Structures are given as C-alpha cells and as structure tokens.
C-alpha cells in the first residue's frame, strides 16, 4: 500500500533494540582479543569455545563502557546488576546459552533526544541497556544465495563469540506518525553518535558493530488499540533502517486494510530487494529459561565510579548540536548542510583553530567537499582542520584571494605542507605592492588606450579588459578588486 | 511403570515431557518419554514442597558465598592455537567447525 | 613385590618423607602403584584411564630434579588419581559420559596444574557417575566401580572411582568433586577420608560443571593429614574462576598436627540423628561423639528445621543448573556426533547425539531442570529452591552461633548392593545425600572420615564434620584428633580391616582401564 494511504488509516507504533559491540581490547568474559578480521577461530580461549570446565570472568572495561553508555542514554545505573543465562540451542552459541542480563540490567529508564532533518525534536524513551556477549559467525555453504535456506552445511567461526555487547531497548514509541521511518534512522544515528563520542565502539554498521532490530505495529488511527508487532532484524545501515520501517508499515497496512491479521514474527530485511521476509514465528518455543548466571557475581558499581564516569561524559549529541548552531549563528539550513555532510567534527575543529564559523563551513561544505566527492573519499581525510583554519586566516589577511586559496588547498592536499608552506614554496601570495600593480596597469593601458575614455563615458565594464590583462600579467597573484580600484582611480585623473 | 503412575504424576503429561525434550534437544524415544513422565511426576511431587517455606519475606540465594564486582582487567591473554581449537571437532573445514544444514533462522 | 606392596600402603605424607630421604624414588613409587592398579583394578574398576607411560616420565623427571638438588614440594613424587570430571591436557576427560569418550582437552584444570606444579604424579583418571550425577558410580557410562570392602557393593558416588582407588591402595591421594556429597559419601562407604572445602576455596576452572553454585573440588585420601596436605596444594585464589575466594588460607596440615578437641563445642544436628539412619551407622556416630566428649569436647544438640527441605531444593537447583551446563554437549566443537539415518539438520543431529550420548540419569535431570526453569514454573520451583537455600544458611548461621563445628553421620546407610537402588523411584537414591547436601547449599566445608564398621554388615561408616564458611581448618583439627583417638582404639587404620584384594583373583580383568 502507498505510504501516505497507510498513514491515513494507521498510526505506527515503534520499538527498537540496538546492539552495540564494544571496542574493548578483550572479550566480555575471556581474555581473548576482540579483533575484527582475524583468521577464523584464532581469537579463541576455552571459554570462547564453551569447552567443558571453562568459566567466564567479567571484563572490567566493558562494565565501565556499559555504565558510561547507560549514563549517556540518561539511564539510571542499577545499584546491583547481575548476569543471567538465556538458554537456547544454536550452533553459533558455544555454550548453547548466552550470558546476558535479564531482571537486573546495568542501566534502565532513560531517554534520548533525537532531531529530525527539519530540526524537530523527539524524546525516545529507553527501557534498559544491558550487557551481554555476542555469538560466533556462521557461514552457509552450498545453495545459490549464501543464505541459510538451501545451504548444504554451515561453518562456525567463534572469533566473535564473546565480544561484549550492550543491548539498548526502547520503550514503546508512540506518536512518530509519518515521521516513523526518518525517526528510526535518526534514533540509530544518534545512538551511533553517542557511542562514537564516548569512544566505546567502532560503530560500523556494515561490520555489525551496531545492529538494529526494529519492532513495528500499526494501530488503526484513533482507535488506541495496539496492533500485533513484527520484529525486523538484520538492518545494517542507516538508510536500511529508514527503508525497512517504511516497507513494513506499507506491508502491514496492506494486510490489515484487507481485513487480514499480522503474524507476530521475526522478519528479515533484504537490502537487495528492499523487502522483509518472514522468519521464525514467535511462540512458546522461545522459552529461554533465564536464570541467574551461577558462574558470575553481581556487579555493584560504587557511587564514586558512577560519578567519575558521569563527569567524563561528552556532551549529548543533540544538546551539542543545539549549542553549536547557536554559537556559530548558522541558519537551520546551513547547520543541517554541515550535519548531513558529516562534517560537524571538521567544522568544529576548524572553528576551534581560529577560523570564523562561516568561513569554516564554506570551505568544508564547498571546495573541500567538492574535491572529496570528485575523488570519492571522505572530506575529513583530505585536509586537517588546522590547515583549513590557516588557509582562512591567509585569506582574511589578504595574503590570498579565494582563487589563490583554492590553489593553496590543492597543494596542501597534494602533501606539499601547510598552507603557509605552500604559499612560500609556490610563491602564490597576492601582490599587494601598488607600484607593481600600477606598472602592470600602465602597460595594459598602453595596449588598449581607448579604455580610459570608455570608462569616463560611463562604460565602467570596459575596465574588465584591463583588469584581465593585469591579472594575466601578474599570473593571478593580484587582488582583482584592488586592480579595479586602481584602474577607476586612473580614469578619474 | 503404570502402577506408579496412579499417584504423583498427575501434573506431568507425556506431551510436556516431549516438549521439554525438544527444548533440551534430546531425541527421546516413546519408551523414555513414558518412563520419564512417571519419574518426573514422582520427583516433582516430592520437590514441590519447597514452596511451603519459600515465603515472600525470604530472599533468594544464588551464590553460597556472596561476592561482588569480580572483574578481569582488559588485557589480552593466551589464546588456543588453531590446532587446539579444532582438536576435538567432530567435523571441520577451512579452520572452522562444520555442521549440517540449519533449519530456521538466525537468532 | 613385598617392597611394592609396602610402598602402596604408605600414606602420602609417609611416602613423601621416604621420597625426600631418598629411601624410595618417585619412579619406584609410581611403578608400585601402576603394578597395584594392574593387579586389582580389573575387579575394582576405579580407573577409566591409566597413564602409565606419562606417570613414569613425570616420576623420572621428579627424581632427576631431586638429584639435582632442587627444592621440591613435600608431596613431590607422590602419585595421585584424578577424578575424570577434571580436564587434563594429556589424558581423556570424559566426566563418565559416552558423549565425551576419548576427548582430550586442550587445557588443564587449575587444580590439575597446581598438582603438577607441586610435583605430584598423575596416575590416571577415575571413574564416576556420568557428569557426577549419582551416589553409586553405577551411572558411569563405562560401568560401575566396585567397593573394595565388598566388590558387590557400591563405592558411593559420584566419586566412587577416586574413593575406591585410595581405599584399594591404587593411589595414596585422589582429587574429587562434591556437589551434594560426591566426595564425602564415597569416603563414608569406603572407609576413607574426603573433604569438600568452602565453596570458592578451590578453583572450579577446568572442572566439568554439574551445578556451578554447588560444585567444589576437594581431596580424597586415607588419612586426614593426607587430605590436608593435598588441600594445601589445591586451595587458593584463581583469577579464572569468578567465584574463587581471595582469602589467605592457613595451612590445613598444620591444623592436623595441632589437632586437639579440648574445649571444642560440637553440635549434633537433631534432624540428622535418628529416623532413616541405619542402626550401625548411628552406633558408630554416637561412640565417636562419646570419645570426643571424653577427650574434652562439649556435645550440644542443635536444630536445623529447614534441612527437611534441603533435598527438595537441591534436586531443583542441581538439575536446573545442570540442564544449562550440559547444553554445550551438542556435537559441534568436541565430543560425540551422531547423525540420524539419512542425515538431518543440525538441530536433529544435536538431538540424536544427546539422545545417544547421555545416560538415563543425565536425561532425567536435564528434563527435570528444563522443567524447573520453564516459563511459568520458575518461581514455584527454582525461585523457591533458592529461598530454601537462604533458610538452610540461616539454620547453619544460628547453629554456628552456638558451636564450633557440627557433626552427623555422613550418610544414612552403609554401602548398598550394586543394582539395588537402580530402577524404581529415583527419590530413594537421592535420599543418600540427605546429610551431605546442606553443606553444598550453604557453601560451607565438610569432611567425612572413618568412624568404624557397622555391626550388622561389617561395612565402613563415616562421620561428617561441618564448619562455618572459610573455617576449613577446624575440620582438620577435629578430624585429625578423632582419627588419632579412633586409630588408637582400633590399633591402626580402619582400612587394615578391609579384605585383601588378592591379585590372584584379579586375572580376569587384565585389560585394566579402558
């Protein structure tokens, strides 16, 4: 069904479970390295393999990271928190239970402020954030698609088994209405910003460092009745989050509008087709038989530890954006331009290095973004904010024209050094000596003697020919505005 | 078996045992299900008495000796060699454990 | 061979002395025990695996070190048997189960490492009820162990192999594990000594878990001093086990050497003294108490009303934890794999493997544990059982407020016949652990040592002492004292009265360990 039509009939109700892989040096419960991309089954101890007799021991850094994340999500930190076993059989789960948290999560009852592209803000209520371990990686072999269906056999690599995770669970989110897809994307993006600013996760969705399961149900508009929800898994990019929610709203609306019912089930997002497909139905078979993990002891963070971590928290991304926009005096459009180009950090650092916010914005979203785009790289990888600030300073001082500054930027990107070094090495500074300019003007006028008369007759644009000749003679290193001034002065003599 | 099923096992049914066996991934045969239904009934009857004294005011004890905040520093330790990892594998390929086809979706 | 027989009859402590003095070499000591194993284990079946070559090599290495003048541990060169519940990187580790047949782990349990570092010589792995589930060793997938006092009778369980090995002089020392009495009850029925330390005193890392919150590793021996010496080797903090205590422990061996009961207050638990206990068991128990009293101890009756619920709580907590701990046996990373005829999905392979690889008692407890943890039953069963645990702890707390140690018979009866309690109501087997289970629920230490022979059947009877958590040394004090007093009465160790396992009768079982 058409999205607009679906929204006429139904109100979407959302909920998210976001898994964040922590970038600790070792795993959650074993001293095996937490590395991505190692050879299969090389980052493994008896505990990661669930060998008989092996035991888990909690990684202190993972607990600190989890508390920091809980605090950044506005959560309360549990006075006492404990681990539980979630029992189910699956070959990627070495012990056939996952050590997770159940009735006593490390953090609970928080909220995250999320901003939509047009600047409207939403409070996403957080139910809980709990610590757990990741599973191993299955590769399905045989069959045409590499997917689980039709595979002949599967191979298990336990390198990822035991990598620390924090699962962030929202409360039910009402009132997203037609913003639901964008809100979903903004929420996951905000979580990403938070964990990046905390430095606790690499947060690369394509690597699975950040994974989102989205719960969606539809409520007939105005009815107040909650519909049956589906849980869409495997959503591995911000764009997919938005698309998957939109797809699922349309799919459910189509079924409901025809008088059908929604099955409570797990659904899988397929990036290639842009659709979700049915997975396991949720049933009594999901009896996880949680019980307190007898091999581990309660985590009781001291108030001092919590305050230490709270004091070290970076500013919340939404609050920070608000503050920056006000400080920089940007319009909403200008600010969003920076945010959407993923250049907030670069602009901030350039301003911190002394550039005016407007110049910093113009350079980053203008020339630098253009060059980055042309060579298909990240703008941030081309040039350091400090160099951009120096470039701006040189322009402000009149040492460089915009045009010269672009040449200097190219030099900097080419690795020729700082802007000042490029200026010196290439001799690109503006010629600010009026004597040299006047000499060049005299020469140009000698070649075009009628120009002064034309100007005097009011045809001011005739100056252009002389300015062009002078700029050419000066190899561009003249300030065109100054040349023009000098030419007009001469005409008045 | 039938003589004991007269008492005690009323709470446990064969269907229940079959479901528990499925949760526990044990492919019990019919005979085992029948005898376990009786035995489980007997056991459950005699262990159910715990609820007599487990009143609301009694806290649960999960660990006999209470400890808290037992942590490990985030420092990389020794890992197994790939030979050690795979030494017990019933089947393996490409340095990984090989299992037959998986029905159903990933958790 | 007289010399070899003499060596195997020595206590670990005495053997250690002779090794130190050079009177006996480690290789001689090991060879003597290997010969004894070859001679009698066909009948006893205490061992699942005998590492003859490895043991000789280890012994030779100890001799070499000693010759080079290295400072060695008091037990260096003394042979030891290791319960198969402990993983060893050079011997199969099966926990008595078919599902782990032949599995050689890539690592050593912490206690095994400590024992090796002290220079003890591992002889092999001992038989046990499958995954330590049982009180008779009849639930071993590899056949039962026989009680050296009467080969038709059970050696106790789950650690029947370790107890029978030391009782039949096939090792002076053994390691055991005690989840509900698996060290103490076999000691009781075999006339040996076994100690369950305070929960967390000895690392569980590398012990194939039965019930994580109840399991504890401990020493098995013929004398209290020998258990103390081994206890001192294996106890201490292990960063691999989160539940491991950081306490500095006093020397248990010192506690034995200073043994004295004058002024000691001993509590007798009313609920474990009377109904359900065999007369001969009670008679020896009360004689022992009288002897202690005569030597200056004060005997006080105490009540533990919650003990009535302890077995019920235990048979909920244990299966619940075990059902989860045993989920890892799934045919993916180690152990048995059984593929159904015509192949099957991984789920079917797992279910077929577990059906074929687990014995009936293991299945029974996994199903029970799965039930106890299921949605809708958790609070009534597992949750309630954890509350009973609190009540049992409170009973102990109040008792230890009045007395220094508690005493009871270790188990209600002497060794019953093999097969006698198999089949029928499983609860009748479970009642064997009535006196030992409360200590596991509360995490406190317990010891069983010989108290004599029952008049009605001439079989060994044990007395159990319990102490507050962390007060393990008290057990060695009172146990050492009682042992001295009793042996003075008996004119030597109780085991001297055990029938001789004449090697001539053993020829039928020359194949020895599997």
Image (tube, rainbow, N blue to C red):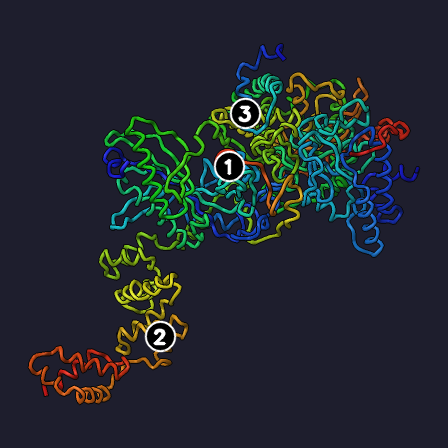
* Tag in front: 3 or 2: 2
Residue B53, image x, y percentages: 52, 22
For the residue pair A476 and A129, the one nearer the viewer reads as A476
Distance from Cα at disc 3 to Cα at disc 1: 29 Å
Quarter of the picture holding the N terminus of chain C = top right
Q: Is residue A243 above or below residue B39?
A: below
Q: Mark 1 and mark 2, same subunit?
A: yes
Task: State the residue position of label 1.
Answer: A150
- Dot 2 falls on which chain? A
Which disc number belongs to residue C461? none
Are the residues tagged 1 and 2 within 8 Å (C-beta)?
no
For the residue carrying disc 2, how many other residues have a C-alpha within 10 Å: few (<14), some (14-19), or many (20+)?
Answer: many
For the residue pair A92 and C201, the one nearer the viewer reads as A92
Task: State the residue position of label 3.
Answer: B20
Distance from Cα at disc 3 to Cα at disc 2: 73 Å
Task: State the residue position of label 2.
Answer: A419
Residue drawn at x 36%, y 49% as measured from the top left: A189
Are the residues tagged 3 and 1 within 8 Å (C-beta)?
no
Quarter of the picture holding the C terminus of chain C = top right
Residue B20, image x, y percentages: 54, 25
Q: Is residue A454 visible?
A: yes
The secondary element bearing badge 1 is classed as loop
């Amino acid at each position: 069904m058409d999205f607009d039509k679906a929204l006429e009939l139904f109100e979407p109700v959302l909920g998210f479970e976001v898994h964040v892989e922590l970038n600790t040096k070792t795993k959650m419960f074993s001293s095996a390295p937490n590395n991505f991309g190692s050879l299969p089954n090389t980052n493994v101890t008896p505990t990661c393999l669930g060998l008989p007799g092996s035991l888990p021991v909690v990684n202190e850094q993972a607990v600190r990271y989890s508390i920091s994340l809980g605090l950044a999500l506005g959560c309360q930190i549990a006075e006492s928190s404990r681990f539980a076993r979630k029992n189910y059989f699956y070959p990627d789960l070495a012990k056939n239970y996952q050590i997770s948290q159940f009735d006593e999560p490390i953090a609970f009852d928080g909220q995250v402020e999320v901003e939509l592209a047009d600047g409207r803000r939403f409070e996403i209520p957080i139910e809980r954030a709990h610590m757990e371990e990741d599973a191993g990686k299955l590769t399905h072999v045989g069959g045409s698609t590499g997917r689980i269906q039709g595979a002949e056999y599967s191979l298990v690599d336990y390198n990822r088994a035991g990598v620390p995770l924090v699962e962030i669970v929202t409360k039910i989110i009402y009132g997203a209405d037609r913003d639901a897809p964008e809100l979903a994307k903004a929420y996951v993006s905000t979580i990403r910003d938070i964990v990046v600013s905390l430095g606790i996760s690499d947060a690369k969705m394509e690597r699975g460092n950040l994974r989102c399961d989205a719960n969606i149900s539809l409520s007939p508009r105005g009815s107040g009745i909650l519909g049956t929800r589906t849980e869409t898994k495997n959503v591995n990019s911000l764009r997919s989050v938005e698309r998957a929610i939109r797809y699922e709203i349309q799919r459910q609306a189509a079924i409901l509008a025809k008088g059908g019912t929604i099955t409570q089930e797990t659904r899988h997002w397929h990036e290639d087709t842009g659709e979700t497909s049915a997975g396991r139905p949720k049933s009594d078979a999901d009896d996880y038989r949680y019980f307190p993990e007898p091999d581990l002891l309660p985590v009781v963070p001291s108030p001092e530890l919590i305050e230490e971590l709270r004091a070290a928290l970076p500013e919340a991304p939404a609050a920070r954006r608000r503050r920056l926009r006000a400080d920089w005096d940007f319009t909403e459009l200008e600010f969003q331009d920076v945010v959407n180009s993923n250049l907030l950090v670069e602009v901030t650092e350039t301003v911190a290095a002394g550039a005016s916010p407007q110049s910093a914005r113009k350079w980053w979203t203008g020339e630098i973004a253009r060059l980055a785009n042309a060579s298909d790289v990240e703008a941030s990888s081309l040039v350091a904010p400090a160099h951009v600030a120096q470039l701006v300073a040189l322009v402000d001082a009149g040492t460089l024209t915009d045009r010269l500054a672009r040449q200097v930027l190219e030099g900097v990107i080419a690795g020729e050094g700082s802007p000042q070094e490029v200026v010196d090495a290439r001799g690109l500074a503006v010629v600010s000596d009026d004597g040299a300019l006047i000499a060049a003007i005299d020469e140009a006028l000698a070649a075009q003697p009628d120009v002064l008369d034309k100007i005097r007759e009011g045809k001011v644009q005739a100056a252009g020919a002389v300015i062009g000749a002078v700029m050419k003679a000066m190899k561009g290193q003249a300030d065109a505005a100054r040349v023009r001034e000098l030419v007009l002065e001469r005409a008045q003599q | 078996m039938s003589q004991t099923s007269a008492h005690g096992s009323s709470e446990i049914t064969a269907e229940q045992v079959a479901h528990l066996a499925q949760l526990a991934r044990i492919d019990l045969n019919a005979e085992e299900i029948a005898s376990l239904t009786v035995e489980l009934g007997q056991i459950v009857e005699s262990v159910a008495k715990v609820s007599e004294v487990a009143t609301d005011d009694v806290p649960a004890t999960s660990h006999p000796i209470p400890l808290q905040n037992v942590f490990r520093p985030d420092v990389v330790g020794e890992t197994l060699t790939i030979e050690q990892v795979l030494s017990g594998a019933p089947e393996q390929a490409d340095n990984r454990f090989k299992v037959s086809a998986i029905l159903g979706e990933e958790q | 061979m007289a010399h070899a027989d003499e060596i195997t009859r020595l206590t670990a402590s005495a053997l250690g002395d002779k090794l130190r003095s050079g009177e006996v070499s480690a290789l001689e000591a090991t060879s003597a025990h290997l010969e004894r194993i070859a001679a009698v284990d066909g009948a006893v079946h205490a061992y699942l695996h005998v590492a003859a070559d490895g043991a000789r090599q280890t012994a030779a290495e100890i001799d070499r070190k000693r010759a080079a003048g290295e400072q060695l541990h008091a037990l260096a060169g003394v042979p030891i048997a290791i319960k198969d519940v402990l993983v060893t990187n050079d011997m199969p580790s099966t926990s008595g189960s078919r599902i782990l047949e032949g599995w050689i782990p890539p690592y050593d349990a912490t206690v095994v490492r400590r024992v090796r570092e002290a220079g003890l010589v591992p002889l092999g792995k001992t038989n046990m009820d499958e995954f330590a589930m049982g009180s008779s060793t009849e639930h071993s997938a590899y056949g039962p162990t026989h009680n050296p006092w009467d080969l038709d009778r059970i050696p106790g369980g789950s650690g029947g192999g370790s107890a029978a090995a030391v009782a039949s002089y096939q090792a002076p020392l053994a390691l055991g594990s005690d989840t509900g009495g698996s060290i103490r009850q076999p000691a009781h029925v075999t006339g040996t000594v076994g100690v369950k330390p305070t929960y967390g005193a000895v690392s569980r890392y590398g012990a194939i878990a039965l019930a994580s919150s109840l399991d504890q590793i401990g020493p098995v021996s013929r004398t209290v001093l020998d258990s103390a010496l081994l206890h001192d080797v294996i106890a201490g903090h292990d960063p691999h086990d989160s539940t491991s205590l950081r306490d500095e422990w006093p020397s248990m061996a010192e506690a034995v050497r200073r043994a004295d009961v004058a002024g000691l207050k001993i509590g007798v638990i009313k609920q474990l003294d009377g109904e359900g206990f065999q007369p001969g068991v009670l008679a020896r128990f009360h004689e022992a108490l009288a002897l202690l009293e005569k030597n200056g101890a004060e005997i006080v009756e105490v009540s533990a009303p919650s003990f009535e619920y302890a077995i019920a709580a235990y048979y909920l907590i244990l299966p619940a934890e075990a059902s989860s701990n045993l989920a890892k046996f799934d045919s993916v990373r180690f152990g048995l794999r059984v593929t159904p005829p015509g192949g099957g999905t991984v789920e079917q392979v797992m279910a077929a493997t577990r059906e074929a690889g687990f014995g009936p008692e293991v299945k029974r407890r996994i199903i029970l544990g799965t039930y106890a943890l299921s949605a809708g039953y958790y609070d009534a069963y597992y949750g309630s059982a954890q509350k009973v645990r609190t009540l049992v702890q409170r009973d102990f707390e109040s008792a230890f407020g009045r007395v220094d140690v508690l005493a009871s018979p270790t188990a209600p009866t002497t060794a019953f016949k093999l097969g006698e309690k198999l089949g029928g109501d499983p609860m009748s087997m479970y009642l064997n652990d009535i006196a030992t289970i409360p200590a596991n629920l509360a995490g406190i230490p317990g010891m069983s040592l010989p108290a004599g022979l029952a008049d009605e059947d001439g079989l060994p009877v044990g007395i159990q002492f319990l102490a507050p958590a962390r007060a393990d040394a008290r057990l060695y004090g009172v146990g050492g004292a009682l042992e001295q007093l009793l042996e003075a009465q008996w004119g030597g160790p109780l085991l001297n009265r055990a029938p001789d396992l004449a090697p001539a009768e053993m020829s039928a079982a020359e194949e020895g360990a599997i």
